Image (cartoon, helix red, strand yellow):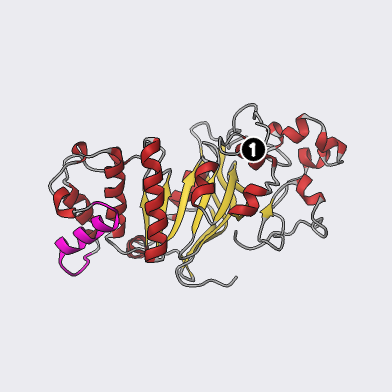
């Protein structure tokens, strides 16, 4: 597989762990993902789909059981020095700024912490001020001595982003970056991420349960279910022509989308220790429930035949669905492709 500098990607990434009862849980089960410089990719799915585990594994906070994380054409080096160097280039922005910021640290100290950890040269004061300014906190000096409890939720999120920007990273991984913010502030933070992509060439992976957010910010979307990517491609293709029943169900309840009849998914995402046979979505699939899968002759396959991601169409749109396979000539062999 060709890899270029500044690209963060995974190939067949799997993370397993053993529960206290001795069962093996497959939190990630062959996940392929690719985030390039200057693009915004949204990783979408319900709670329990494996999104956060994938984000943590991308950052080296979890070690994969199998598969690899690659950055800049090289596999991730899990040594202390290797992870330190990697985390200067790839920074994570957490979803809860109130919990992520040390309440005893001023804004200045919070942003300067990474600079000190990585031994960044130059004027610390100027670097902190520049990072705060880039995050939309101006004049930056006015916030140097303020504490997290003195800031609004939006300001705290911007401080977290400033702390990442201070290290001049290539990529940001933003885990639910606006989920704790008021609706009036969410648009400002999303606009900030888009501006940073444009001005600094940052790549951004946004982890979210909200397809509406993905619609507004992402160049590409990857939809995750029970540890696997089940659909991925350019945002317009995925959201205007969703092919996986799971994507269709998630999209149908986005308030801005009125053309789809809301689909109610029954039950919860299964326990990762009890992944269903066949298509892992089949216990909740509306196409099985309403008989359309049986009418198309794929019900038995849905129940019994596992399905990897199908080859992309000419638009780069991938999907893992037996129903979708019927509409893709030549896809019957169901080969596995490269990163999404």
Left or right of residue 267, residue 190 in this image: left
Q: Position of residue 135 (x, y in %)?
A: 29, 54
Question: Measuring 66% from the left and 40% from the top, which residue is drawn there?
Answer: 248
Q: Which residue is mark 1?
A: 275
Residue 271's place in the image compared with 26, above or below, is: above
Left or right of residue 146, residue 265 in this image: right
Q: Is residue 120 magenta?
A: yes
Residue 316's place in the image compared with 286, above or below, is: below
Q: Quick one: 138 or 131, which is closer to the camera?
A: 138
Q: Position of residue 320 (x, y in %)?
A: 70, 49
Left or right of residue 189, residue 162 in this image: left
Residue 169's place in the image compared with 325, above or below, is: below
Q: Position of residue 138 (x, y in %)?
A: 22, 53
Q: Quadrant of the C terminus?
A: bottom right
Q: Which residues are magenta?
A: 119-137
Question: Residue 258: which quarter of the image?
Answer: top right
């Amino acid at each position: 597989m060709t890899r270029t500098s500044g690209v963060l990607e995974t190939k067949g990434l799997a993370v397993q762990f053993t529960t206290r009862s001795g069962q093996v849980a497959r939190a990630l089960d062959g996940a392929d993902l690719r985030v390039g410089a200057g693009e915004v990719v949204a990783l979408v799915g319900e709670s329990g789909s494996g999104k956060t585990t994938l984000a943590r594994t991308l950052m080296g906070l979890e070690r994969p059981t199998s598969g690899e994380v690659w950055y800049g054409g090289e596999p991730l080096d899990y040594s202390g020095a290797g992870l330190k160097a990697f985390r200067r280039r790839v920074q994570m922005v957490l979803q809860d700024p109130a919990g992520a910021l040390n309440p005893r640290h001023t804004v200045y100290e919070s942003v300067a912490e990474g600079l000190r950890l990585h031994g960044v040269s130059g004027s610390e004061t100027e670097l902190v001020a520049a990072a705060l300014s880039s995050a939309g906190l101006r004049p930056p000096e006015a916030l140097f001595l303020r504490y997290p409890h003195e800031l609004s939720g939006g300001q705290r999120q911007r401080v977290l982003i400033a702390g990442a920007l201070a290290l001049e990273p290539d990529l940001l991984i933003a885990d639910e970056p606006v989920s704790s913010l008021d609706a009036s502030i969410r648009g400002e933070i999303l606009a900030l991420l888009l501006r940073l992509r444009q001005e600094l060439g940052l790549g951004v992976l946004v982890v979210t349960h909200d397809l509406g957010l993905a619609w507004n910010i992402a160049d590409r979307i990857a939809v995750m279910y029970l540890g696997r990517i089940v659909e991925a491609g350019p945002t317009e293709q995925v959201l205007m022509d969703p092919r996986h029943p799971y994507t269709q169900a998630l999209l149908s309840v986005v308030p801005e989308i009125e053309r789809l009849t809301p689909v109610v998914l029954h039950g919860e995402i299964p326990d990762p220790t009890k992944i269903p046979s066949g298509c892992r979505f089949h216990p909740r699939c509306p196409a099985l429930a309403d008989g359309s899968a049986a009418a198309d002759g794929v019900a038995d396959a849905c129940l019994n035949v596992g399905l990897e991601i199908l080859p992309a169409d000419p638009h780069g749109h991938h999907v893992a669905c037996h129903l979708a396979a019927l509409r893709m000539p030549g896809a019957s062999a169901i080969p596995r492709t490269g990163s999404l």
